[in-house]
Amino acid sequence: MTRNITTFALIGVLLLATALVGCSKPSSTGQKTEGAAKQSLSGTILVDGSSTVFPITEAVAEEFQKAYKGVRVTVGISGTGGGFKKFGSGETDLTGASRPIRPTEVELCKKNGIEYIELPVAYDGLAVMVNPKNTWANSITVAELKKIWEPEAQGKITRWNHVRPEWPDRELHLFGAGVDSGTYDYFTAAIVGKEHSSRGDFTSSEDDNVLVQGIATDELALGFFGYAYYEANRDKLKLLAVDDEDPRNGDGPILPSLETVINGTYQPLSRPIFIYVNKKSLDRPEVAEFVRFYLSHAPKLVKEVGYIPLPERAYQLAQKRVDARKTGSLFAGEGSKVGVKIEDLLAAEDK
Amino acid sequence: MESDSKQSQETLREPQPSLATIGPEKAFVAICRLAVALPLLLLVVLVVDAVVDGWPRLSWGFLTGYPSRNPEIAGILPALAGSAAVIVLTAVMAIPVGVGAAIYLEEYTKPGRLTSLIELNISNLAGVPSIIYGLLGLELFVRAMQMGRSLLAGAATLALLVLPAVIMTSREALRTVPYSLREACYALGADRWQTIWRVVLPMSLPGILTGIILSVARAIGETAPLIMIGALTYVAFLPDSLMSPFTALPIQIFNWVSRPQKGFHTNAAAGIVVLLVLMLLLNATAIWLRVRLQRRVNW
C-alpha cells in the first residue's frame, strides 16, 4: 500500500517538474533573422483592439520581433469597443480601432488620465456582395441600400422587386457583419445615416467566414463585410458596384478596388482604420520604436494582409503627429465619419 | 464453497425472454445501437474531416513554428507550450484542493444540513457554463488580485472550473472503498489518519486519478474562459514565468478559423488534429493508470 502513496507523490513531483521545464525554456528559440538583431531594446508591448486591424498589427509585430529580439509584442482581439475599454483603463499601450474613438470612450480616457495619439494606418473597403448565380443585380445605389437596411425596412422590404421594380419577385436574404463590430457601426453610419441603427431581421455574424459561406450558398443573398474577405473568396462571391449618386466622387456605380478606395471614388463605403497610442507609453523607447516601425512598414505590410494602404504622405504626416505628441482625435471624438480622405485631414492639421 | 459459486452463477444466467417481450426488446436494442453509432459516426466524420483538411500542414515545422501572417510558415509552438503550461499549473492547483475537499467531505464531515448544502453547491458549480468562470477569473484574478493577463490567472481560472468535477469524481472514488475495510482498520487499532492514508486513499487512487485526468483534459479544450480573461491571440514567444502573457491551442484555432485566407483554415484543421491527439493521449493515460493501479488492489 505504501507503494501506491509513492506513486501518488511521484506523479505530483513529475507534474511539478514538467511545469518548471515548460516554463524555463528560452523565449527566443527558433526566431531567426537575416539582419543583425538589435539587442538594445527590451520590454513588452501590449496591443489589443479591433479584429479588423489585427492582421496588420500581427504582421508588424512579427517583423518587429524579428528585428528587435529583446522586445515582446502581444496582440489581442477584443473588438474596437472592448479594446478601448482596456486602453482607457491603461491596460494596453496601443489599441486597434476600425472606427474613430467615441465620446464615451474619450470620457473614459479622460477619467483615467490617459492621453492618446490617433494614427490612421490603412483603408478598409466594405464590399456589398451577392451570390454569383445572381444575374439581375450588378450595381446598387446608396439610396437603395438605405431602403434595404434602415430600421423601417424590417418586415417590409423582403423581396428583390421591393428594392428595384425590374428585379425579380423573389425573396431577399440579408447577411451582415455582427452588431458588435466596427464594420457594422461604419456601414450603418454610411448607409442608414445613424451609427448602430438598422433592421434586425438579417443573418449577422461576428465571424465573416460564416457570411461568406451564407452568401456563397444562397442565390437570393445580399450582404456586406470587409473587402479583405471578398479578396480571399473572389471565386465564391459577386461584387456589386456602389453608386452614391454624387458626381464629385466619380460618376455612376463604382466597384471597390485599390484605386477607387485610395482616390476616394468608392464612397461612402471605404473607411480609414486606426491605431491609438497611449502617450505615456511613447516615453518607453521600445514603444516609440514600434510605432515608428509600424508607420514605416505599413505600406508594404498592409497590402500583404489584404488591406489598402494610405498614400505614402499620410504615413509621414502620421509620424509627424507622433513626433509632436499630438493628442486627441481628428474626428473630434464623434465616432464614425463618412467619406473622409485621411490625408486631407492630416494635412489640414499639419498647416 | 463450490456449490455456493455454482448457485450464484445460476442466478446470473440470463432469463429466457417470453415471446411477448421479444418484439419491443429488439426495437429497444436497435434504438440503443443507433444511439451509440450516431455519436461515433459524428466523431469519425469530424476527425476525418479535420485530418483531411489539415494534412498538408501537419509537420514538425508546424509544431515548432511561431504564429505568422503567412499561413505556410505559421506554427503552434507558443500555443502548445501555453496550453501545456496552463494544464500543468491547473492540475497543480486543482488536485490538492479538490482531493483534499473530497477527503474531508467523505471522511470527516458528519451528514447534516450544512454538508448537504455544500454538496448541492458543488454539483451546481459543476454545471455552471465555463464563460461564467471566465468572468469570475477576469474580475478576481486579473483585476482584483492584479495578476494581469498571465499564465497564473489563466491557470487559476481553469482550476476553479475543474474543481467541482475533481471533487465529485474523487468522492465517487472514495465511496467505492467498502466501509468494512475502514472498520477492519479501526478494529486493528489504526486511527482515522492512518486509515485514510494507508487504506482508503491507496485503494481509491485509480478512480481518483482517472477523474482528475478526465477533468483536466476537459480544461485543455476550454476556450471561452481563456478568451474572457484575455489570453492573447498573437504571442510569438514561449511563456517563461508565471506572470508571462500566453496563448493556448483552442484560441489559436479560433483565431485561424475566423481569418479570410484559405491557408489559415488549413492551419486551423491541423491545430484541431493536434488538440484531438493531445486529448486522446491524456485520456489514454487515464485508462492506462487505472488498469495498472487496479491490478494491485485485491480484496
Image (spheres, rainbow, N blue to C red):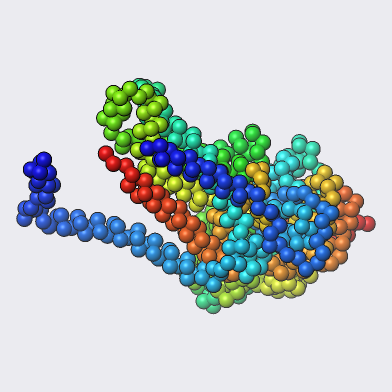
Q: Is residue B7 left or right of residue A72?
A: left
Considering every residue shown, the one lying at the far right of the view is: A351
Q: Is residue B111 above or below residue A248?
A: above
Q: Quadrant of the rendered structure where residue B235 is?
A: bottom right
Q: Front-most of B107 and A57?
A: B107
Residue shown at the point (52%, 65%) measured from the top left: B269
Q: Is residue A11 left or right of residue B45?
A: right
Location of the C terminus of chain B by quadrant is top left
Residue shown at the point (65%, 53%) measured from the top left: A25
Residue shown at the point (31%, 37%) measured from the top left: B176
Q: Is residue B100 above or below residue B250?
A: above
Q: Front-most of A95 and A264?
A: A95
Percent coordinates x, y for residue A236 in the rendering? 55, 74
Percent coordinates x, y for residue B208 in the rendering? 40, 41
Percent coordinates x, y for residue B24 in the rendering? 14, 55
Considering every residue shown, the one lying at the far left of the view is: B19
Percent coordinates x, y for residue B119 in the rendering? 39, 30
Q: Taking the image as drawn, is residue B23 in sight?
A: yes
Q: How many marks?
A: 0
Q: Quadrant of the rendered structure where residue A30 is?
A: bottom right
Location of the N terminus of chain B by quadrant is top left
Q: Taking the image as drawn, is residue A197 in sight?
A: no
Q: Front-most of A162 and B105?
A: B105
Q: Front-most of A162 and A116?
A: A116
Residue shown at the point (43%, 64%) measured from the top left: B47
